[in-house]
Amino acid sequence: MKLEWIGHACFKMTAQDGTVVITDPYDESVGIGMIPLEADMITMSHGHHDHCEQAMIVGDPVIVRGQETVSLGSVTAHAARSYHDDAQGTLRGENVIRIFEIDGLRIVHMGDQGCMPDGDVLAAIADADVMLIPVGGTYTVDAVGAKAVIGAARPVCVVPMHVKTKRCPYPIAPVTAFLEVMGAQDVQPCCELELTKGHLPQGVVLMQPQADTL
């Protein structure tokens, strides 16, 4: 499986059989240029404009919202209901965590996770091969909160997202705060990851948001 970070909470995952999944496409308010997205499946963690924009989606992909389980090609996407805040969703609503099964790997996309997940959700996301997790704070868990979630869920590899990049105007923290908390300040960003069960990085992996370079 190939993993690429488009920007914000938007990732592109390409399975070995060519099935393409895009997560949480965003709108222009994020400040990061959105590139045209062609995929077989588009997943959206919740209905906020920076996670469910369809204007740049090319073709006629399957669009997955809510908590249904969807299989397409070699990819299966499960869902776990969680919250966008630490007040049971009363402040910002619900959030859907996606658990993808791709090429024998379990990839967890945390969406706009705003709290420590409850026990059932932690069980569903535990021991993932890769966790894509927001770390910027304000609207989601911050660096300390993300570290707590990671400690509880024990993923092999962690990719931070939903952080302040050079064009993003949101009042969220840059990734450096998370890297410091995790003791990973010397990590160098990569453009893409080729992931298999036999070739899986451990710990924090920093990715370069592709659209932020445009």
Image (cartoon, rainbow, N blue to C red):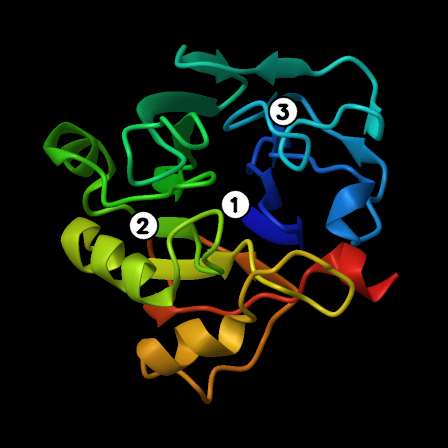
Amino acid at the residue labelled 2: Asp
- Residue where numbered disc 2 is placed: 129
Marks 1 and 2: CB-CB under 8 Å?
no
The percent coordinates of residue 88 (x first, y second) are: 28, 29
Residue 155 in view here = no
Q: CA distance from mark 1 to mark 3?
A: 17 Å
Give the number of the mark in front: 1 or 3.
3
Q: Within 10 Å of the Cα at label 3, are there few (<14), some (14-19), or many (20+) other Cα atoms? A: many
**Image quarter of residue 163:** bottom right
The percent coordinates of residue 65 (x first, y second) are: 53, 15
Q: CA distance from mark 1 to mark 2?
A: 12 Å
- Residue where numbered disc 1 is placed: 1
Precedes in sequence: disc 1 or disc 2: 1
Precedes in sequence: disc 2 or disc 3: 3
Residue 158 in view here = yes
Circle on res. 42: 3
Q: What kind of element bears circle 3? A: strand
The percent coordinates of residue 173 (x first, y second) are: 53, 67
**In terms of depth relative to the viewer, which is nearer, 92 or 124?**
92
Give the number of the mark in front: 1 or 2.
2
Amino acid at the residue labelled 3: Ile
The percent coordinates of residue 180 (x first, y second) are: 38, 82
Residue sitting farthest toward the bottom: 186
**Image quarter of residue 126:** top left
Amino acid at the residue labelled 1: Met
Rendered-image quadrant of the C terminus: bottom right
Q: CA distance from mark 2 to mark 3?
A: 21 Å
Q: How many marks?
A: 3
